[in-house]
């Protein structure tokens, strides 16, 4: 399908990730593309990577479940979003391999792209990716690098509280308004003050843990 707009959006989360598409129809306007790799048709994909001693990789639930097995726990990594933009290396003991945070994030993004292709037959070349309001330039750059590694030609970033405000019908044509947006994430809690003025939406201040 040839698209003239970027209709896909990705939540690349600390704990779970998901991809959705905007249809623009009068019915269901936004549709989550369900996970195909875990065999349970879930809306979300756990942000987890497992590499076994042969170097075979698993993504999502099939990776996360390995954490409870002490024989494979050192070959699984989660919450690598916290280290985006750093030189931290995640080691997979059995295979002797190591990966940077953006490389692990790229595998999650590849999995989401594959879900779309399997469900719809479409190859996603561009998607908006949300990032925390607290992400600094180096963290945003690492997110863009992960998207490139995953095969995305375009990946504009959108701050998560702004995305939330837009998704829930924020009226940008109001003369002036302030909103308080809470993000109860699986790995983080954030709150942001959002300002709408003269047709634009901006994060005034944010904080969290």
Image: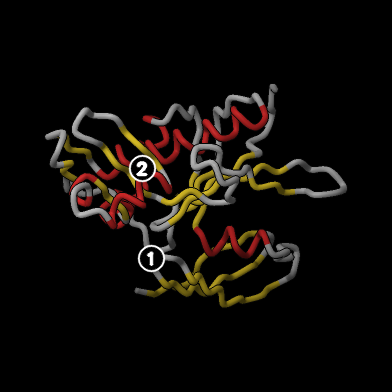
> Which quadrant of the structure image shows residue 6?
top right
Distance from the alpha carbon under mark 2 to that under mark 1: 15 Å
Front-most of residues 135 and 186: 186
**Secondary structure of residue under mark 1:** loop
Q: Residue at x 75, y 41 (%)?
A: 23
User: Is disc 1 surrounded by few (<14), some (14 to 19) or many (20+) residues within 10 Å?
Assistant: few
Total residue callouts: 2
Where is mark 1, residue-wise?
A: 187
Whole-percent x, y for residue 66 in the image = 30, 49
Question: Residue 45 location, x and y as percent?
Answer: 48, 48
The secondary element bearing badge 2 is classed as helix
Nearer to me, 21 or 158:
21
Q: Residue at x 36, y 42 (%)?
A: 105
Disc 2 marks which residue?
A: 105
- Tell which residue pokes out farthest to the right in this image: 26
* Residue 167 visible here: yes
Residue 141 visible in image: no
Query: Which residue is at 65% across, 47% downward?
Result: 32
Residue shown at the point (27%, 45%) measured from the top left? 101
Q: Quadrant of the C terminus?
A: bottom left
């Amino acid at each position: 399908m040839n698209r003239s707009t970027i209709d896909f959006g990705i939540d690349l989360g600390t704990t779970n990730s998901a991809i959705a598409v905007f249809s623009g129809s009068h019915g269901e306007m936004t549709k989550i593309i369900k996970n195909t790799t875990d065999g349970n048709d879930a809306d979300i994909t756990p942000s987890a990577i497992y590499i076994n001693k042969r170097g075979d990789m698993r993504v999502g639930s099939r990776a996360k479940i390995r954490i409870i097995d002490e024989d494979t726990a050192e070959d699984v990594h989660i919450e690598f979003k916290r280290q985006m933009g750093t030189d931290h290396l995640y080691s997979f003991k059995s295979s002797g391999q190591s990966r940077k945070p953006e490389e692990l994030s790229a595998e999650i993004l590849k999995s989401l792209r594959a879900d779309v292709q399997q469900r719809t037959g479409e190859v996603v070349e561009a998607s908006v990716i949300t990032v925390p309001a607290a992400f600094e330039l180096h963290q945003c750059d690492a997110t863009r690098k992960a998207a490139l590694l995953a095969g995305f030609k375009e990946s504009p970033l959108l701050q998560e509280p702004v995305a939330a405000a837009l998704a829930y019908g924020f009226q940008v044509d109001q003369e002036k308004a302030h909103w308080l947006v809470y993000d109860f994430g699986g790995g983080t809690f954030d709150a942001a003050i959002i300002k709408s003025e003269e047709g634009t939406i901006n994060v005034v201040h944010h904080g969290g843990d």
